[in-house]
Amino acid sequence: MYRLLATITILSTFTLNAKEPKFRQQDIDVEVGVGYGLQLADMNGDGKTDIVLVDKDKVAWYQNPTWAKHQISGHLTERDHVCVAARDLDGDGKAEIAVGGQWNPGDTVNSGAVFYLKPTPDRSGNWKPIRLHHEPTTHRMHWVKNPSGVYDLVVKPLTGKGNRNYVGAGLKMLAYKMPENPEKDKWTTSLVCDFLHNSHNFHPVNWDEDPEDELLVTGIEGTWFLNRQKDDTWTRKLIAKTFGGEVRDGHIPDGRRLVT
């Protein structure tokens, strides 16, 4: 059990004239503290998918195929880091990174932190953390495509500010617009939703034919489909009443979508 908690592992599949796939375990890092989140993205522009890890006190990426470790931050906050988002935002083939930290779900007033990490020229060493506005209990984040085809950073807290036992203000999920100069210019925010009181996760998906992403979000009030409008407002539709901890979408063989 302890080894599983402290290890990044890949299971590779291969077939040798067999009907069932065979799996081969490969350890990537056996010294992970608390691996709060992983992302898959090309970090150095070589066309290969790398692994990005947010550990409790560091952020690192592992280079495919050798899985050489590149630590790009130390401990950014007094308490644990909690989430990471990685995506190529400018089309250069190299992913940008945002990180959430100061994880303390018991403090719904002063906890939380959000950072954009400015990469070094060679993408090694410690990237410069740019501290952004945050809501308390920062918990999950994704880069989400907006109607202009540009990616915004969407960040969701666990609970609302001052919320006690899921009672009080709703959590504020915010979309951050990256400015031309992410280090010196102001990042503006717009409200995605504020009606949920406890939500563990959300998932971006392009559900229809428009360019922007939609969101699936699950919480104590059920699982919801959020649809972005051109004026940056969001409509919502309840798709399941049960309280879920995780949410993902998929397709069944006839092409119809499913949500799990």
Image (tube, rainbow, N blue to C red):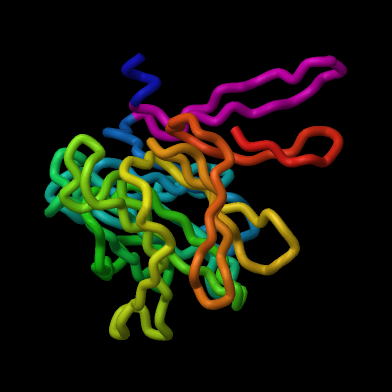
Q: Is residue 41 visible?
A: no
Residue at 31% across / 44% down in the picture? 197
The spot of residue 90 in percent (x, y) is 55, 75
Most foreground residue, 108 or 139:
108
- Number of numbered labels in the structure image: 0
The spot of residue 255 in percent (x, y) is 82, 41
Residue at 60% across / 73% down in the picture? 147
The quadrant holding residue 76 is bottom left
Most foreground residue, 226 or 89:
226
The spot of residue 144 in percent (x, y) is 52, 62
Task: Report the span colored magenta.
Answer: 6-30
* Quadrant including the N terminus: top left
Q: Is residue 8 magenta?
A: yes
Secondary structure mainly formed by the magenta segment: strand
Most foreground residue, 30 or 52:
52
Q: Is residue 198 left or right of residue 209?
A: left
Residue at 86% across / 36% down in the picture? 254
Q: Is residue 137 visible?
A: yes
Does residue 155 lie above or below 108 as drawn? below
* Quadrant including the C terminus: top right
Does residue 178 lie above or below 127 as drawn? below
